[in-house]
Structures are given as structure tokens and as C-alpha cells.
Amino acid sequence: MITANNCRVVGAVYADMKISFLIHNAYGIGGTITTTFNLAGALAERHDVEIVSALRHREHPNLVLDPRVRLRALVDLRKEADHPLHQRPAKVFPSAEYRHHQYSELTDQRIGECLEAIDTDVVIGTRPGLNVHIARQAPQRVLRVGQEHLTLDNHPPALRTALRRAYRRLDVITTVTEADAAAYRRKMWLPGVHVEALPNSVPDPALPPADGTAKIVIAAGRLVPVKRYDLLIEAFAQVAVAYPDWQLRIYGRGEQQPRLRELIERLRLWNNVFLMGAATPMEAEWAKGSIGAAASNFEPFGMTIVEAMRCGLPVVSTDCPYGPGEIIQDGADGRLVPVGDADALASALLELVGDDERRRRMGRTALENARRFAPGPVVAQAERILEDALASRSTGGRTATEQNHHRSNSALIGRSHAARDAAHAAAVGALRAIRKGRR
């Protein structure tokens, strides 16, 4: 149990917490890594923070990590890719998780040993498979938090079943949107687990915001089918006919690059649409534009939308599940259009391209509205969530959400405890067997 002896309370916030993040591979590139680095760095202002990377494949991270945050890895693939235990499939990391092929009995062992010995107040998982490890192997004296950076409905049925069983041992689950938090509460029976939305944060810009005068639309992200850059290019073809001096710049790398380049050639948009490659950080590129654009079929959150707005750009986006509709206020700081509708996307872009005053006014509103995603407000919310959970554990009480779960499901709680204890025993047994070389 966390007490005032090892977690100092200042006002309404626990200060000097020890917080550990467990991440897949901190040495790669991706939205989860970015937002974890952002949150860890902001929390390090007042807390002792470390990031534990399950895997490592290079000497230094691709992204810049706040020097106050410690980073350590459990399995170094540069040296241990051929380890005998790494040739055997993982048994704790759920097989239905799409990263399962990258995990093994070696990662089961290293993660289990790390969690068993962890000297921290809070441990935070950053993907479903790692959340399962925390649920089954982290000691009860530690506050166990599972972050969801995708969505419940995006997970295959087999994974949802595995999560439903394991997540009952967590204390807190955070999602990046209110819609996904509601889905967890509605579809997963998790008595005693607090579920709350915690959006991703974007650092305060270091450069002046865009002034809305540049004739440039900017999009950024992985060049993969779900992002629908083909739809965006087709929509921008209509913009280029009416306003040939405007450009679309697309930043990112991915499998769709050859197909997108072919589409640009076929539509004869050589002078209007440019595949810019990856840019890190993106802030300087956003500041060169006047409008942000996103055409995805699906966005668990919409990190690039927030990045663009934080640089003073109104954003035209498809109103896809789940994030854009919770970020953009249609008509105030951007536009939301139906998914897959190139004409509607083109019309919304043309509205802003053709009206300088409206575009600049919406850019100023975007800059103001996006402040809620700054590190300060997001970290304050994260601290409040942890504070509530720690207080509930230390007093043996329940939050209002937990009380509702308890009243409505009291007849089933005994069975849930037996199931989660069995799962925990199985995970511990598997870890011990690995250590003793029985399998």
C-alpha cells in the first residue's frame, strides 16, 4: 500500500511519486512512443519517472527524451535475438495481440522479473499485451494502470476476451477518447477498475504560430491505407483547379508511397502535391502551412490534428471514429466531413482556401482550443486520476464508478476474484517454469 511514507501529498496532488512506464520499443518511431515520451517528460517536472522498454534494437532512441526520465531496456535484440528462449513463443503476452510474434519466453521472463522487483508507486502499460503482463505479474502494492492507445472495438474478439479476463486485476484503465472509455464501461465487465479518458498531449510550440497567409495545406502521418492519402489527393485535385497556386504537402513514410506518387502523376498534380518524406519534429513544417488536413477512415485519437492546431492551423478532417470529433469543433476551429467522401473533403478545403479571413479566424480559434492538449492540463488530469486511485487504495474505499459496478454486479464479484486469481497463478507458474528450465 502506498502511504505518506513513500508518496508525499501536497495539497490535492501526490508529489514525488515513482512512476514507471512499460513500452514495447522506445527506440522506434510511432504515436505511442511520442505520447509516452511527452507524458513522461511532463511528469518528470514533479515525479521520479522511468521508461522500461521491453525491446531494444538500436543504440539511441529516434525521439528526444527528457534527460530527467530514465530509460532502460529488458531485451536487447542486437545481442539477444538468437537467445534460445527468444525462439519460443510468449505465453503471458496474449497470442491475439498483433505484436505477439515479437514476444517470447525471454520477454515473458524479463518482464515478469522486472515487475516482480519493481520499486515504484505506479506502473503504466502502454499496449494491451503489456497491460496483461502488469495485470497478472505486478505486485498488488503497486498501482497498476493500463493505457489504451487504440480502441476496444479495434481489437479482435479473441483479444477482447483475453483483456476482459486480465484487466480485472488492473486499478485504472485510460483511453485517449471519451467514446472509447464509454465502450469499455459498456462492453467490458471490470468491477473495481476505474476507466477514464486521458487524451494525448502535445508540447507547447517553440515557434510562432502560423499566420494563415501561406498557400499550403499540410498532412502528416504514416503512408498506410487507413490514412486515405489517396482520398486527400483526389480532393485536393479540385482545389488545384480553382486555386493553382496552392500546394498540398504530405509528410511521412510508408508502404503507400509508390501508389500515391503514381496517383499524383496520373492526376497531373506535379506542381501542387508533394510527398515530403518524414520530418522530426514536425512543428517547423506545420508552421509553414495555413490548413491541416486528415482523411483517415479510423483514428484512435488524432495526434497530428492536435499538432496542427497547436501551431495555429484549422484542420479539415473526416469525422471518423474516434478522435477527430472530440478534437475539432466543426465550423469553429476546423471542419468535419463524412468518411470516404472526396467531394465533401474538397468542398471543406475550398471553403477555407477561398476565405482568407475565415481561415485566419479559425486558425486563431484552433490555437486557443488546442491548449487543452498542452502538457499542463493533461498532466494535471493524469495526476488527478492517479491521486484518486491511490487515495481509494489507501483508504480501502471505492470511487463512484467502482461503487456502481459493485452494486450492479455484487452477485458475480466472487467468481471474478477466483478467475483473476487463477490467471495470476498461471502467469506466475509460467514464469517460474521458464526460470527453472522446465520447458
Image: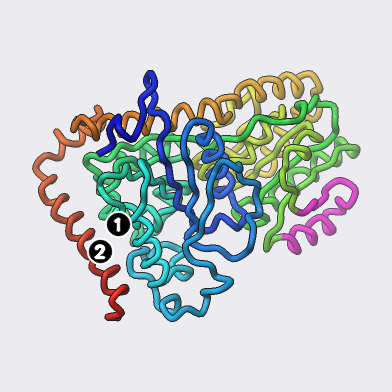
Q: Is residue 43 left or right of residue 210?
A: left
**From the viewer's perspective, is 285 left or right of 411?**
right
Checking the image for residue 137, the label placed there is 1
Per the rendering, the mark at residue 189 is none
* SS for dot 2: helix
Quarter of the view holding residue 224: bottom right
Q: Residue at x 36, y 59 (%)?
A: 159
The residue sitting at 32% across, 54% down in the picture is 163
- Location of the N terminus by quadrant is top left
Residue at 45% x, 35% y: name it: 198
Q: Is residue 175 above or below residue 374?
A: below
What residue sits right under mark 2 in the picture?
A: 428
Amino acid found under the numbered disc labelled 2:
Val
For the residue marked with disc 1, what is the amino acid? Gln
Magenta-drawn segment: 257-277
Nearer-the-camera pick, 256 or 423: 423
Q: Are marks 1 and 2 in contact (CB under 8 Å)?
A: yes
Pick the residue in front: 399 or 323. Answer: 399
Quadrant showing the C terminus = bottom left
Where is residue 261 drawn, in percent x and y? 79, 59
